[in-house]
Image (cartoon, grey):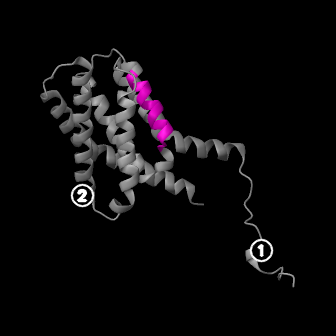
Amino acid sequence: MMPDPSMSAWEPEIRPRQTVWQRLDHGARRLLPSIFIALIIIFFSAPLNIPGAAELLPAIVIATVFFWSFWRPTGMSGVAVFLLGLFMDLVGFTPLGVSAFILLLVHGVAFYARFGLMRLNFLLVWGVFALVAVGACLLQWGLACLFRLAVLDIAPALFEALLTIGVYPPLSALFSWVLNKLDEKEDP
């Protein structure tokens, strides 16, 4: 017996072909978080005498990776996080792979915890981010101690953790606005 040709289950989904500009626009929207992080790394690594730039750079990068890995993981892939971490290490003259490792851990926690956290309000998500930020900063401090074979002062690591926690709400508001604008553009 032949299938009924009027049955929609037998018809492949028909989509109109995207133009070159539509594909470029879609690709640019997916790369937006990575481009933002790359520009932040370049800006804060430039010799502009910005007070607190060394502490602010990892705070902004960790908060950005967490937000986009949590809310739009297609815009923040693991490969992009790894490459951005290596770029951050190269520009900041830190041991190669340290930032990439820490950022991949932040990305992994945000990516795998997102389904459980999406229903929670902002304060609880911020609390989870605070734990991730403290863990990332303490891990960075621990690796710095290991590389120097000495116990370093923990105060800068705690300051960086507090700064990272404090940077998240304004960045989250900005990125939420950007995410809403991107979603409005995707809807026909």
* Amino acid on which disc 2 is placed: Leu
Quarter residue 4 falls in: bottom right
Residue 111, x across and y down, in percent: 41, 51
- Real-space CA distance between mark 2 and mark 1, rounded to the nearest whole angstrom: 46 Å
- Residue at 45 percent across and 34 percent down: it is 82
Query: Which residue is label 1 attached to?
Result: 10
Q: Secondary structure at mark 1?
A: helix
Magenta stretch, main secondary structure, is helix
Q: Earlier in the sequence, mark 2 or mark 1?
A: 1
Q: Quadrant of the image for the C terminus?
A: bottom right
Q: Secondary structure at mark 2?
A: helix
Quarter residue 52 falls in: top left
Residue 35, x across and y down, in percent: 48, 34
Q: Is residue 4 left or right of residue 13?
A: right
Nearer the observer, 46 or 80: 80
| Magenta region | 76-89
Magenta stretch: residue 51 in it? no
Give above or below for 124 relative to 92. below
Q: Quadrant of the image for the N terminus?
A: bottom right
- Quick one: label 1, few (<14), some, or many (20+) residues within 10 Å? few
**Farthest bottom residue in view:** 1
Nearer the observer, 19 or 109: 109
**Farthest top residue in view:** 47
* Amino acid on which disc 1 is placed: Trp
- Residue at 35 percent across and 28 percent down: it is 98
Query: Which residue is label 2 attached to?
Result: 124
